Amino acid sequence: MTMNFFRGVMGGQPAGPQPTGAETIHKLCDRVASSTLLEDRRDAVRALKSLSKKYRLEVGTQAMDHLVHILQTDRSDSEILGYALDTLYNIICNDEEEEQDENAQKQEEDLGVLFTDKFLGDSENVTLLLTLLEEFDFHVRWPGVKLLTALLKNQCNQVQGVILVSPMGVSRLMDLLADSREVIRNDGLLLLQQLTKGNAAIQKIVAFENAFERLLDIITEEGSSDGGIVVEDCLLLLVNLLKNNSSNQNFFKEGSYIQRMKPWFEVGDDNSGWSAQKVTNLHLMLQLVRVMVSPVNSPGATSSCQKSMYQCGLLQQLCTILMATGVPADILTETINTVSEVIRGSQINQDYFASVKAPSNPPRPAIVVLLMSMVNERQPFVLRCAVLYCFQCFLYKNQKGQGEIVATLLPSTIDANSISAGQLLCGGLFSADSLSNWCAAVALAHALQDNLTQKEQLLRVQLATSLGKPPVSLLQQCTNILSQGSKVQTRVGLLMLLCTWISNCPIAVTHFLHNQENVPFLTGQISENLGEDERLVQGLCALLLGICIYYNDNSLENYTKEKLKQLIEKRIGKENFVEKLGFVTKHELYSRAAQKPQPVFPSPEQMLFDHEFTKLVKELEGVITKAVHKTSEEEKKEEEVKKTLEQHDSIVIQYKDLIRDQDTQIQELREQVSTLSLNSEQMQNQITQQQSQIQQHKDQYNILKLKLGKDSQGLSSSQGEGAHVNGLHSEELSQLREEVEELRRQHTLQHTQLSDKDSLINTLRCGAAAAAQTAEGGAGGSDNTELLGEVESLRSRVQAQCAEISQLQTERLELIRRAEAVSSDPASSSESSADTVTVSELESRLAAQTTEAERLKEECRGLREGHAGLEQQLASAQSTVAIEQTEKTKLQQEVQESKKEQDDLLMLLADQDQKILNLKQRLRDLGETIDEDEDELDARDQFGEDDDDDDDEDEDNND
């Protein structure tokens, strides 16, 4: 049928020479370009599509421009658009056929890149393609997705740049995930995988286009780990979005998507029959968890994700898989690696992992079960590496865990009936398998990492080598095996353990040097000219000897710093020593191990360096080189500088303590100020309340005054109404009588206090006279005379005050008599009520005077204290003139204080006098005569209102 079509293109000639493929494609291109009928162009494009795979080069070279033009002009016909897109896809996509050899495959790839570059020569072509993806027609959308995916595979960065600057470019591609046709949705996943590779900006845009929610929904719909290839594609896209992208990782965590990962790992009890797809899916799911807690992420973000994984139960679910049976080896290995990074550096996660028990009889800790796999040479190599990584992560920044591991080696904690982690490590350390030696040595080194206490504790470990022989220390046994010339892997592991053990631990250095065979062995190893394989061992021996110099406390006379350096100079040579030391960092496996914490090695033979040990070497290489080259004088100077710095540090510590104490005091004072401020506020509130009450009383007084004025006007016409008003305020009058009685008692008390003060002044006067008689010298006599004059002046002032108070008392009695006289007249009951209110105001002012009298009492107490001091001064003045002069000065100070207090008293009395005058004036303003009797009011104060006539007579008798 194709030949018939070609005949039609060539003019319908059935016979003659057949046209070549290039000629046919040329005619088809002319037909696409020149035909005016859409059907003709459609047939020509269909023919190009059928030839595009066999004649890829010719179609790509001649027809690409015409096909792009079709995409631009024939937008209305979806069929021709589909043919054009399929044709472009065929010439750009590289078919991955297994039967092709490498050269043919390389040529195919070169053609794909060539035609991709040609298509991308105009960036508008990519924009045009994005526009076509908005078409819902299947025959347009699906080939458009495949074409864009092929372009991304061949020239990812260039296409990403165009899509990134295209308006709504990423959003259009995200719409593919919502397509109801699974084939388009699935190819859209592949497209997004290619789009998000290595471009953080596009990754962020895709994430904020709600990609996480859509992808997790698809995974759930497809059956999670039991799903098919679609779940795998979703997981690959999630890994692309999250790996090395802190912004997306934070968005994923804050969106609570970590919690949605937990159901993925809920595997059933029957773990038989794991399909290859399920293994792949679960492997990617574990990889996604590791992306969130990878050691290369920022510590804060990693810690936050670790906490979330523990809180939502994800870590617990992973540990369940870890202890389950029937789990495939590669899934188990990846689960161990995942758990390792979830607990790395997280104390709460590490504590939980330490509590996990294996389902054995009796139950054993998960750590012990894992270590049994690590030291078992029959286990897969990758599994043993994973267990070692898990143990390292468990001990990373976990001093509590380090102490628990070392404790299982100490004599006091060894349990003969159970297998402990320490026993497994010792067994692996001294087994015949070099890989077990290395893993056990590195694991034990991590139990000592940055932990001086455990380094010292491990020195106590004793090992029983054979029957009848005394036990040897673990440190000595390590050096014994080292000197026996075992495999390179074993010696490297032991040397790393020893370097980690004695670094920054002078006591361990002393124990190591105490064995007389260790230093000669190290110098002999370093000085020999050995083969390429032994260079690394020589370098580690130089590092160990350098640590013995740098951390030496000179406690052993034969192996002080200076003697060890002399030994190096004589037997090795300083330059040769430094050169051998440099062999460590120049080793190719050293740089590989320094890249990341996880031990990943192609083969067991290349397992030589530990990541944490590379950090130690980097830290010590320079300082050891300097220490070897330093002279004794330079070391003395350094010691002096260290001592000076220590002194400075101690001074700084003292100042810090002082500042801390001052901060505490300041805090206490601030608390006191806060308390006082609170009290002040409370007092201010009370004052405000009292002022409010006073204002209320004033308002009531004004209201009563108005009422009384109205009652006086209507008294002639309604006598009964006045009596009613009087009865209305009887309760207030009773209250006023009680207040007057209280004021009377207070005045009596005030009078008593003034009498006491008078007697005190007399006593002071007598004491001053006695002092004047006993004082020696003219100057002393004149001073005493002045004191007597001041005391006499004070007495006269107090007497004047007493007179004033007596006068006030007399006036008060007159006011009381007048009130009684007024209240005895029934016709003037309304006026009496007004007087009562006025008296109430007067009594309130007298209450203030009572408060001032209390102050006078306090001043009297001060005078008593001054008098006591004066007597003491006068008694001591009789001994010598000098003593008398000193006492006289004190006496003058006391008198000055008394004078000041008396002045204050005078001012208070003056204020009292002014207040009384104001009260008198107010009474006059009310039209009252002050000299009238008020006996009836006094009688009512004592007996009440029920029996006015009888009470008045009793009151007269009492007065």
Image (cartoon, rainbow, N blue to C red):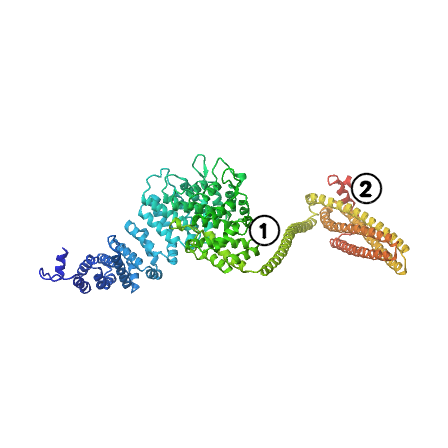
Q: Are marks 1 and 2 in contact (CB under 8 Å)?
A: no
Q: Can residue 886 be seen here? A: yes
Quadrant position of the C terminus in the picture = top right
Type of the residue with mark 2: Asn
Query: Dot 2: within a 10 Å radius of its alpha carbon, few (fewer than 14), some, or many (20 or more) residues?
Result: few
Front-most of residues 578 and 117: 578
First-in-chain label (1 vs 2): 1
Q: Position of residue 102 (x, y in %)?
A: 26, 56
In the orientation shown, which residue stands out farthest toward the left? 15
- Name the element at disc 2: helix
Going 33% across and 41% down the picture, which residue do you hit? Answer: 274
Q: Where 369 sits versus 547, above or below?
A: above
Q: Nearer the viewer, mark 1 or mark 2?
A: 1
Compare residues 327 and 843 and report the one nearer the observer.
327
Which quadrant holds residue 168?
A: bottom left
Visible residue check, residue 316: no
Q: Amino acid at mark 1?
A: Leu
Residue at image position (77%, 50%) is: 858
* Residue at image location 43% in from the left, 36% down from the top: 360
Q: Nearer the viewer, residue 382 or 550?
A: 550
Tell me, for residue 877, which label it has, or none.
Answer: none
Q: Where residue 958 is drawn, which disc sits there?
A: 2
**Residue placed most toward the observer, 178 or 584:** 584
Residue at numbered disc 1: 556
Q: Position of residue 554 (x, y in %)?
A: 59, 53
In this picture, residue 913 sits left or right of residue 234: right
Report helix, strand or loop for mark 1.
loop
Position in image of residue 607 (x %, y %)? 41, 50
Q: What's the distance in space between the residues labelled 1 and 2, CA to CA?
A: 110 Å
Left or right: residue 144 compared with residue 883: left
Q: 10 Å neighbourhood of mark 1: few (<14), some, or many (≥20)?
A: few
